[in-house]
């Protein structure tokens, strides 16, 4: 028999990740698992069990290979001929956190639940952030090579 957790039984915690020299895709997978709540034993696909993630030093994030210059992001304005394209290099110059946010967004479910879970991602340039009063647990990406390190 499957037991479901009710809304009043859900508790959220905070995590802090330093993105210095981190690869965007690998960082996004770790973040999306935490935001969705897949690191918890009580994970249910249709509920928001996720935790908050604070990412700092986003300006020092890296891409593997030639993706930083060659990869293209597309969006459409809705008008005829309104397709716009950009590269991670141009996007990183304008908004440094947008590249990581797009990667995480595409790993979350579409719809209302995914949009709600994406609001739990907080991205900051530099070492300082305004969420230190939440006492976030620090996640060291270099030690994440061993499996189930995020499991409670």
Image (spheres, helix red, strand yellow):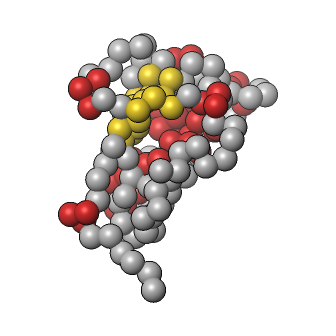
Say which of 144 and 24 sits in front: 144
Residue at the image position 56 percent from the left and 28 percent from the top: 140
In this image, 70 relative to 119: left or right? right
Q: Is residue 50 above or below residue 62?
A: below
Residue at the image position 46 percent from the left and 56 percent from the top: 40
Say which of 47 and 113 sits in front: 47
Whether residue 108 is visible:
no
Q: Is residue 151 above or below residue 144?
A: below
Say which of 52 and 114 sits in front: 52
- Name the residue at the front extreme: 152
Residue at the image position 21 percent from the left and 63 percent from the top: 8
- Name the residue at the bottom extreme: 1
In the image, residue 12 lies at what x, y percent?
31, 48
- The tally of labels here is 0
State the quadrant of the N terminus: bottom left
Say which of 19 and 96 sits in front: 19
- Name the residue at the left extreme: 8
Whether residue 47 is visible:
yes
In the image, residue 113 lies at what x, y percent?
37, 61
In the image, residue 136 lies at what x, y percent?
36, 31
In this image, 115 relative to 90: left or right? left
In the image, residue 141 lies at what x, y percent?
60, 30
Q: Is residue 20 above or below residue 109?
A: above
Q: Is residue 47 above or below residue 107?
A: below
């Amino acid at each position: 028999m499957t037991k479901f957790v009710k809304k009043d039984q859900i508790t959220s915690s905070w995590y802090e990740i330093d993105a210095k020299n981190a690869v965007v895709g690998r960082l996004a997978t770790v973040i999306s698992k935490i935001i969705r709540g897949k690191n918890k034993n009580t994970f249910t696909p249709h509920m928001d069990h996720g935790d908050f993630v604070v990412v700092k030093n986003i300006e020092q994030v890296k891409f593997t290979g030639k993706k930083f210059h060659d990869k293209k992001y597309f969006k459409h304005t809705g008008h005829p001929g309104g397709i716009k394209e950009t590269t991670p290099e141009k996007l990183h110059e304008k908004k440094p956190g947008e590249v990581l946010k797009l990667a995480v967004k595409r790993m979350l479910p579409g719809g209302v639940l995914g949009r709600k879970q994406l609001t739990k991602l907080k991205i900051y340039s530099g070492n300082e952030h305004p969420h230190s009063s939440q006492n976030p647990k620090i996640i060291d990406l270099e030690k994440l090579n061993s499996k189930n390190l995020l499991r409670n």
